[in-house]
Image: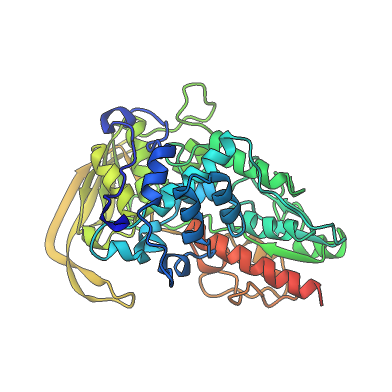
Amino acid sequence: MANKIDRVPVREQDPKVRATNFDEVCYGYNEQEAMLEASRCLNCRKPGCMLACPVSVKIPAFVEKVAAGDFEGAGKIIAMDSSLPAICGRVCSQESQCEGSCILGVKGQPVAIGKLERFVADWSTENGISYSEREAPNGKKVAVVGSGPAGLACASDLAKWGYDVTIFESLHKPGGVLQYGIPEFRLPKDKVVGVEIAKLKELGIKIETNVIIGRTITIEQLMQEEGFSAVFVGSGAGLPKFMNIPGESLNGVFSANEFLTRNNLMKAYSQESDTPIYAGHKAVVVGGGNVAMDAARTALRLGAEVTVVYRRTEKELPARAEEVHHAKEEGIIFKMLTNPVEILGDEKGWVRAIRCQEMELGEPDASGRRSPVAKEGALLDIETDVVIMSLGTSPNPLIAGTTPGLEVDRRGCIVATAEGETSKEYVYAGGDAVTGAATVILAMGAGRKAAKAIDEKLKG
């Protein structure tokens, strides 16, 4: 029976080798491996995997096509709901979404849905197959602020429905967090991000880079002077948070955002780069999410001995299990139940150590996780040259501050309905700009919902 077949393992670079380079860690499936893995699917009558997908990809249908060797058919099915399959297949949190709801995972291992989606997307690219279909132009213009996953998903759907869509991106390359946040070894920029964006341009989407909405031009000007009928704000959450502990202003303290942006977008890892970054001999990353894992694994590849400190236990780590597993394989040290209280410097103003409070778990907090409490008198100094703070991010206040009538909450996030409608008519928002830092696929889901709402609004 199909469910008796073991999950097909994915080939990867050897940990000792990949820890020294920025090449992609996972090689993905070949045709035979993909078909064998797809054959494990039970094709459930009530597929939990599809219900758990934020963009509602018709998972059993595309997996069935893969099992039959019809890879182009599988690609057509995925393209109905996802505009970035090669990206989603690599970075989505499948274990807590589609694969987490696979019935085979109850007593064994779920179908590798993410790896199959990646295979189909890569196969389509390698074989020059495009699934871009567009309705006749309807004469209406929509502006999209931000070229991250929310903006790209929204723009893609609107373009398919005949809208004249222009994306405005503040940086010099499109892609948002896909370009500046996720490292090359997890998401290759030219091979994957650039290719996916090129496919969206085939739909007629225009992308204007180096445009800062709120500085270069405002949302009101886009609508009143440039003739845009609606605006979608998918500007993400790029404002880093710090702990506000002594020593955070020392040389050698970075936000994970700065550290990753300089490495991913500005190629600081390359010897030819004009924007090098100092990773030190020893680096400490504070935090336990996916961004913390990305920063830790990047610092390792830049030559540092890396320690991740997190105030809860490994069970509470919010990062993907796959990323934690890869980090451990590569030699990154994890110190759980450890919370920084001070960064210590030398006489020249550079980091020399981070002082941490040892913790233990107390009662559950509002999220249901047990709150860490300090062990009295238990302090630990960790020698380090670099400290990378990965404590989450919040939206930049620039857009809301220059758009009269656009309501934000106490965190600075734009207030919007589930369909993306904001307090300002014809202005929609979604993704991290609304929720705060979350996942790529959730941002894409928000972008698609907003596109549908914009379409309904503009059609009367």
Whether 163 is drawn above or below 27: the answer is below
Q: From the image, which quarter does the N terminus lie in? A: bottom left
Whether residue 432 is visible to the viewer of this picture, yes or no, is no
Choose top left, top right, bottom left or bottom right for residue 149: bottom right
Corner quadrant of residue 125: top right
Q: Quadrant of the C terminus?
A: bottom right
Position of 138 compared to 325: left or right? right
Q: Position of residue 276 (x, y in %)?
A: 47, 29
- Name above or below for residue 354 compared with residue 262: below
- Residue 141 visible here: yes
Image coordinates of residue 369 in percent, x first then y, are: 27, 71
- The residue lying at 23 percent from left, 37 percent from top is 331
Q: Nearer the viewer, residue 460 or 283?
A: 460
Q: Is residue 103 above or below residue 252?
A: below
Residue 162, image x, y percentages: 79, 59
- Left or right: residue 46 versus residue 266 is left
In screen coordinates, is 329 left or right of 102? Answer: left
335 or 398: nearer the viewer: 335
Residue appearing at x 84%, y 57% in the figure:
136
Q: In this view, does 328 lie to the left or right of 271?
A: left
> Where is 286 relative to 348, above or below?
below
Residue 187, horizontal then vertical, whole percent: 47, 41
Q: How is the rendered protein coloured?
A: rainbow
